[in-house]
Amino acid sequence: CQSPEPTAVLIFRGEKWRSPKLEAAIKACGGEITACEAMDDGHAAGWAIVRSKKKYGVTLDEDAALAIVAAIGPDLARLDMECAKLATAALGLAGEASGGEPRITVDLVNELTGRAREEDAWKTQERFLVGDPETALRAISEQIEIARDDPVMLGIMYLGIARKVDGLCRGIAAGDNPSFVAKRLGIWGAMEGPLTKVARRLTPSQSADLLRAAVECDARNKSGRGEPRHNVETLALRFCAAMA
């Protein structure tokens, strides 16, 4: 078409751009071509810095921007929502400081995003691993009734634990170094000790049974079979029985 609608937009999705003739035709009609490739972490952090200043009126420190991207990824929609939340907090702190510059620091990010969120999630998981039915069921109750967590998400959390424990258990049984196995499975920091302790208490057959039970719980929750909370509580008791 030699006379396209001035506001027309064509979107092409593919691994590579291999249309030089189409590109030439678009440019000949006065059009522009913009690559919509996913941003890498560095460019996403830069985008967040500019966005925070222009839209929300706050300064986002570079290390804070990188920390946000590390925590939630480079998706711009999620970054925008996170910047809005952090900007609100920064403006509140600036007001309390009687006119101080509103600034999003890495400390603020660690408090409201990223690492703090990961640590809270791990503290929840750690309570699932004590092997005591009362403690595990109380943890589930608090997450659902107080923290307002979705039981389906708790089932997914258990599934993640089961996968890591099964991988550790099999590696240890094969004579591999537990720390090496843990790193291979993406287990680090405070997670490594408790998960390794659980894995040492189980046989590969037991860990495989727990993994199958966790997969079944996840499938039941996502397909409407049974009440999700009951499914997760039943799975929790299976874990406790295996660790007894």
Image (cartoon, helix red, strand yellow):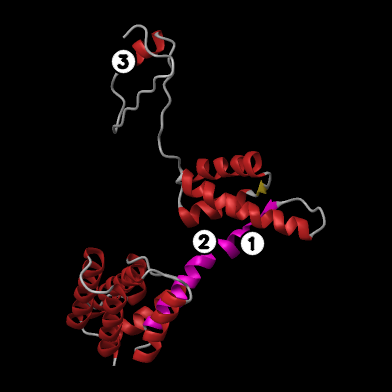
- What amino acid type is highlighted by mark number 2? Gly
Residue farthest along the right direction in this orientation:
98
Q: Which residue is mark 1?
A: 107
Q: Which residue is mark 2?
A: 114
Which badge, 2 or 3, comes first in the chain's sequence?
A: 3
For the residue pair 210 and 200, the one nearer the viewer reads as 210
Marks 3 and 1, how far apart at CA: 49 Å
Quadrant location of the N terminus in the rendered image: top left
Marks 2 and 3, how far apart at CA: 43 Å
Few, some or many residues within 10 Å of mark 1 (<14, 14–19, 20+): few
Residue 150 visible in the displayed image: yes
SS at mark 1 in the image: helix
SS at mark 2 in the image: helix
The label shown at residue 22 is 3
Residue at image position (35%, 84%) is: 197
Res. 109 image quadrant: bottom right
SS at mark 3 in the image: helix
Residue at image position (24%, 72%) is: 217
**The stretch drawn in magenta includes residue 5:** no
